[in-house]
Amino acid sequence: MSFTDTNLSRRTFFTQSAKLATAPLLLGSLFSSLNANTKEGLKVPSWSRSLGTLVNTNAYGLPSIYEKNVVKDILMPKAPTNYTPTSIALTSAVSPLSSLRGAITPNGLFFERHHSGVPQINPTEHKLLIHGLVQSDLVFTMEQLKSFPSTEKTYFIECSGNTGISKSYTKEQKLDDRFGLISCATWVGVKLSTLLKEVGIRLDKAKYIIAEGADGATMARSVPISRAMEDCLIVYAQNGEALRPEQGYPLRLVVPGCEGNINIKWLRRLEVTDTPLFARDEMSKYTDLLSNGKARQGTLVMDVKSVITYPTTVDKLTRKGFYEIRGLAWSGKGKISRVDISLDGGVNWSRAKLSTTPLDRAFVAFTYELEYRGESLMLLSRATDETGETQPYLKQITDVRGFNSESHNNAIQAWSVNTQGEVYNARV
């Protein structure tokens, strides 16, 4: 380096140092000229002035401590005030739809419904027996099941009693209490048809598959052979990880688009038969009692349905201006093709935007821009699926079934908004 180069480097150093020395004065002058809101936004928060938690704090990632209230809620709609639940009553927990975004339900917030508690099953000891009208009765270990070609599909599961049907209702009833017995996940497993072909199913005689769980209730349901050979899955993973115990670990049946109870958890046995089981949970339960005293049986498919998830009962429109109405739609018969929104109780309808890609028998999220002027509103959503089926009004359902049925209510849901911006459960 020459003498000239050295002098230039020194000059550059002192020039830059002088600039740095005056920078705090310039920034201080700039900061003092800012308005109060901007000053507040530029303040360095306490969490930016200290070391955060390290990677060994949680070996399994957990939600933020500030999301501690986003949890499943125990559902006991008929319990008296101040009732202390016993173990027999703790059979349902609803998904917090009001706090979720998007079309996939996190594993820890997927709704629960069971009849005798959650068994803790050792996967190395768990086996699946397939027998009956087959060429060879076979028993599969978990390791063997995972060696078959896998498939990955996204499907919703909905309890048939989700939303229910009742003559009375309360305006204070919350979204999660009415609609929380539904969730949607991506499932990984093996096609049931693959396993049935492996055992040599006798399709000339087979009419049903009896699926049985390993829980204390030995939950069992009949699956028509046509559906079993089409799209049913024997799954061992949910949203990229092993099934949670409350979702059937280590193995469950998924019957796409059909009522939740038939998606047998803790699956241990499949019997191929020529007659349905006529089990309690497909005879006295999970049927649709009609107004004439007769009951519909085998109503497996969940019809097209939707719900606005914001704003709902717990929300309030605190200002005039634009809001984003959000919601979910689904159908057990295929993809959702459109969702319409009404602000006036069904007099006028406008198309909502589908904000996630519609998938076969899965949630699709929708949005709609609302310009709120402080007026009263009656918010409705109405979904249509790819078969052309559209959600009915409640009266259209009760005219046929009456109010005796607890299951398969896919009626349009309403939320009323008063001039104070308060939102309540409503009916139209």
Image (cartoon, rainbow, N blue to C red):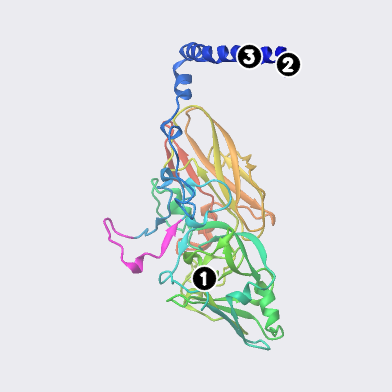
Quick check: marks 3 and 1 in contact, CB under 8 Å? Answer: no
Is disc 3 placed on a helix, strand or loop?
A: helix
| Residue on which disc 1 sits | 265
| Residue on which disc 3 sits | 10
Q: Nearer the viewer, mark 3 or mark 2?
A: 2
Rate crowding at label 1 as few (under 14), some (14 to 19) or many (20 or more) other CA atoms within 10 Å: many
| Residue on which disc 2 sits | 2
Q: Please name whichever residue, 262 or 423, is drawn nearer the observer in this view of the structure.
A: 262
Q: Is residue 330 left or right of residue 417?
A: right
Amino acid type, label 1: Lys
Residue 428 visible in image: no
Rate crowding at label 3 as few (under 14), some (14 to 19) or many (20 or more) other CA atoms within 10 Å: few
- Residue at the image position 40 percent from the left and 49 percent from the top: 173
As displayed, is residue 229 above or below residue 27?
Answer: below
Q: Position of residue 130 (x, y in %)?
A: 60, 82
Is disc 2 placed on a helix, strand or loop?
A: loop
Assign the N terminus to one quadrant of the image: top right
Amino acid type, label 2: Ser
Q: Position of residue 52 (x, y in %)?
A: 45, 41
- Residue at the image position 56 percent from the left and 61 percent from the top: 241
As displayed, is residue 387 above or below residue 211?
Answer: above
Q: For the residues marked 3 and 2, what is the alpha-carbon distance in whole angstroms?
A: 13 Å
- Magenta segment's dominant SS is loop
As displayed, is residue 14 above or below residue 188?
Answer: above
Whether residue 249 appears in magenta in the rendering, the answer is: no
Q: For the residues marked 1 and 2, what is the alpha-carbon distance in whole angstroms?
A: 81 Å
Going from N to C along the chain, the mark reached first, 1 or 2, is 2
